[in-house]
Amino acid sequence: MTLVVNEVRAKSILSPSKIHRYVVNPYTGCQHGCTYCYARFMKRVTGHKEPWGEFVDVKINAPELLEKEIRRKQRGTVWVSGVCDPYQPLEERYRLTRQCLEILARNEWPVIIQTRSPLVLRDIDIIREASGFEVGLSITTADEEIRKIFEPEAPPIPERIAALGKLHSEGIRTFAMIAPLLPGAEGLAPLLKGTIDYCIVDRMNYHYADWVYRKYGLEFALTDDFFSRMNQELSSL
């Protein structure tokens, strides 16, 4: 796979969100390229011709914009991020997420980080000392073979769970985003026990990956019964 990377200058970075008060997306596009990702709709907005997962626009002025925008906007919870993974592999080089977190921490804005990557541990120094920061790892299955089918470019599940455990042991508020609930989620509860403060469970609400379920004979995991059983099991966390 050839990744097309463009360095761009964004016009704004601290955007209103329907999930939290604000969202910061330092990147457009995501190297993880998960088959089901709702953020695929971004292609209709951005006009990218490349398949989802094969392009990333790097907003090189994101920290500069954020520094200015928080001065004129009312303080509120910031979601990092909504339509990209803030810790996708390019973040290791560009460090835009880290710079944005530094600004938000310095100005005491509450932050909810959501990622699939243990790279978040690089910034544990900022997160641990900040006021009102919490971190969630998206963990959709306990089965690595299922992960490879739906999330082939995302970090392995054991690495994500280990990252949650490390963050939690440092006194950082943590959560697991079990969404979408994939086949193989039956084994998640014991793996996550003691690593999180809470979990969020949701079913597959988009149809981008319907072909994957059909190809591998996994349609049972789209049923109400599967979601109900798994939701009940995971609600004990």
Image (tube, rainbow, N blue to C red):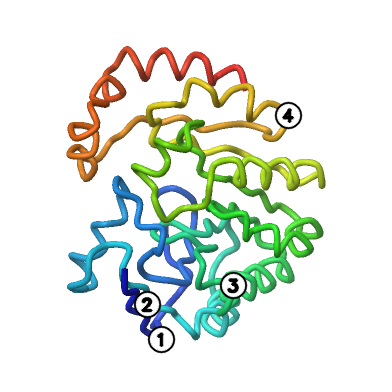
Checking the image for residue 92, the label placed there is 3
Label 1, residues with CA under 10 Å away: few <14, some 14-19, many ≥20? few
Tag 1 secondary structure: strand
Assess whether mark 4 and mark 1 are in contact (beta carbons under 8 angstroms). Answer: no
Q: Would residue 27 be found to the left or right of residue 4 on screen?
A: right
Compute the Cα span from label 1 to label 2.
6 Å
Mark 4 or mark 3, which has the lower sequence index?
3
Please report whichever mark, 2 or 3, sits nearer to the chain's N-terminal start: 2
| Residue position for label 1 | 7
Question: Residue visible at 24% across and 32% down?
Answer: 216
Q: Distance between the residues labelled 2 and 4?
A: 37 Å
- Residue underneath mark 4: 194
Using the image as rendered, state which of residue 175 and residue 74 is in the foreground. Answer: 175
Instruction: Check whether the beta carbons of the residues at disc 1 and disc 2 lie within 8 A of each other.
Output: yes
Callout 4 amino acid: Gly
Q: Where is residue 131 in the image (x, y as percent from the top left)?
A: 76, 56
The residue type indicated by label 1 comes to Glu
Q: Position of residue 50 (x, y in %)?
A: 22, 71
Q: Position of residue 23 (x, y in %)?
A: 47, 61
Assign a secondary structure to mark 2: strand
Looking at the image, is mark 4 or mark 3 nearer the viewer? 3
Single out the mark in the foreground, 2 or 3.
3
| Image disc number at residue 19 | none
Residue 57 image label: 2
